Image (spheres, helix red, strand yellow):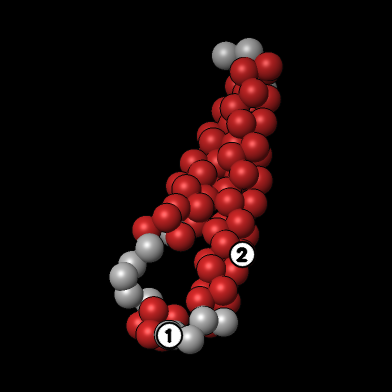
């Protein structure tokens, strides 16, 4: 396997890891801003009980976790391949 391929795998791992961290931060910010906007309204039952569940609020967080795991695995694979064949 060429050294360039190892660097490409490592680069993809770094990209997915950074994207995962950014997606997690965006998800938390979006959830906080949504529930803060609900808090300003008269009926705060949804704020207290979080019902009905809003699946789109956790979409960034789920995608971020998947991307983070994928990025860490790619970085580990790229590092191991680089050490073995480099």
Figure check: 24 above or below 52: above
Which residue is more in the foreground, 44 or 9?
44
* Image location of residue 81, percent across then percent down: 57, 28
- Relative to residue 69, is residue 78 depicted above or below? above
In this figure, which residue is indicated by the disc labeled 2? 29
Q: CA distance from mark 2 to mark 1?
A: 22 Å
Q: Earlier in the sequence, mark 2 or mark 1?
A: 2
Q: Can residue 65 be seen?
A: no
Q: Which residue ends up furthest to the left in the rendered image?
A: 52
Is residue 27 among what the camera can see?
A: yes
SS of the residue under disc 2: helix
Q: Residue at x 56, y 74 (%)?
A: 37
Q: Residues within 10 Å of mark 2 (few under 14, many from 20)?
A: few
Residue 43's tag is: 1
Image coordinates of residue 29 in percent, x first then y, are: 61, 64
Residue appearing at x 59%, y 27% in the figure: 9
At 47% across and 48% down in the image, what residue appears?
63
Horizontally, residue 37 falls left or right of residue 42, namely right
Total of numbered circles in the picture? 2
Specify the quadrant of the image occupied by residue 27: bottom right
Q: Nearer the viewer, mark 2 or mark 1?
A: 1
């Amino acid at each position: 396997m060429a050294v360039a391929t190892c660097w490409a795998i490592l680069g993809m791992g770094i990209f997915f890891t950074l994207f995962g961290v950014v997606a997690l931060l965006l998800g938390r910010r979006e959830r906080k801003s949504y529930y803060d906007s609900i808090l300003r309204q008269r009926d705060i039952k949804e704020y207290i009980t979080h019902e009905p569940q809003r699946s789109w609020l956790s979409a960034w967080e789920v995608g971020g976790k998947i991307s983070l795991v994928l990025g860490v695995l790619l970085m580990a694979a790229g590092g191991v391949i680089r050490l073995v064949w480099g």
